[in-house]
Amino acid sequence: MAMALRCVSVDAPCGPGGRRIRIDDEVLGTAYSLHDLAVFLRRAGLAGWDELDVAESDAIEWHGGGPEVWPRHVCPDGWAAPGGPASLV
């Protein structure tokens, strides 16, 4: 799936297992699964993206593990999304 020259970055897992999602310099939120990440990307204008597209895309920069890494632990810098999993509704 083509992406319109936007830098998608997925931070290392932190907080209660979530990963901060950025497009360019904007933080979209914290994803807790590939499904969450796909929803964030669709809302950012990347229509048609699903979990498989996210997992297989070379256009996503993964930090601290790839698309299969969603552990639950707390990071040394202490950041975590307030209130648990991201509200995607």
Image: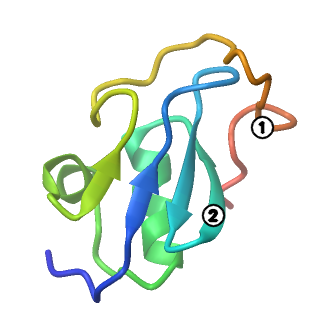
Position of residue 32 in the picture relative to residue 81 (left or right): left
Q: Residue at 63%, 63% (x, y): give it.
A: 28
- Give the residue at mark 1: 81
Position of residue 18 in the picture relative to residue 51 (left or right): right
Position of residue 55 in the picture relative to residue 25 (left or right): left
The N terminus sits in image quarter = bottom left
Between 62 and 35, the one nearer to me in the picture: 62
Q: Residue furthest front?
A: 77
Give the image location of residue 11, x and y in percent: 50, 41
Give the image location of residue 35, x and y in percent: 41, 47
Q: Residue furthest right?
A: 82
Residue type, label 2: Leu
Q: Is residue 84 above or below residue 51?
A: above
Q: Tag 1 or tag 2, which sits nearer the N-term?
A: 2
Q: Residue at 67%, 18% (x, y): give it.
A: 75
Q: Residue at 75%, 24% (x, y): give it.
A: 77
Q: Residues within 10 Å of mark 2 (few under 14, many from 20)?
A: some
Q: Residue at 28%, 50% (x, y): give it.
A: 51
Residue type, label 1: Ala
The C terminus sits in image quarter = bottom right
Between 26 and 48, the one nearer to me in the picture: 26
Q: On residue 19, which mark appears? A: none
Q: Residues within 10 Å of mark 1 (few under 14, many from 20)?
A: some
Q: Secondary structure at mark 1?
A: loop
Q: CA distance from mark 2 to mark 1?
A: 12 Å
Q: Secondary structure at mark 2?
A: strand
Between 25 and 19, the one nearer to me in the picture: 25
- Give the residue at mark 2: 28
**Decide: marks 2, 1 in contact (CB < 8 A)?**
no
Give the image location of residue 58, x and y in percent: 14, 58
The coloring applied to the image is rainbow
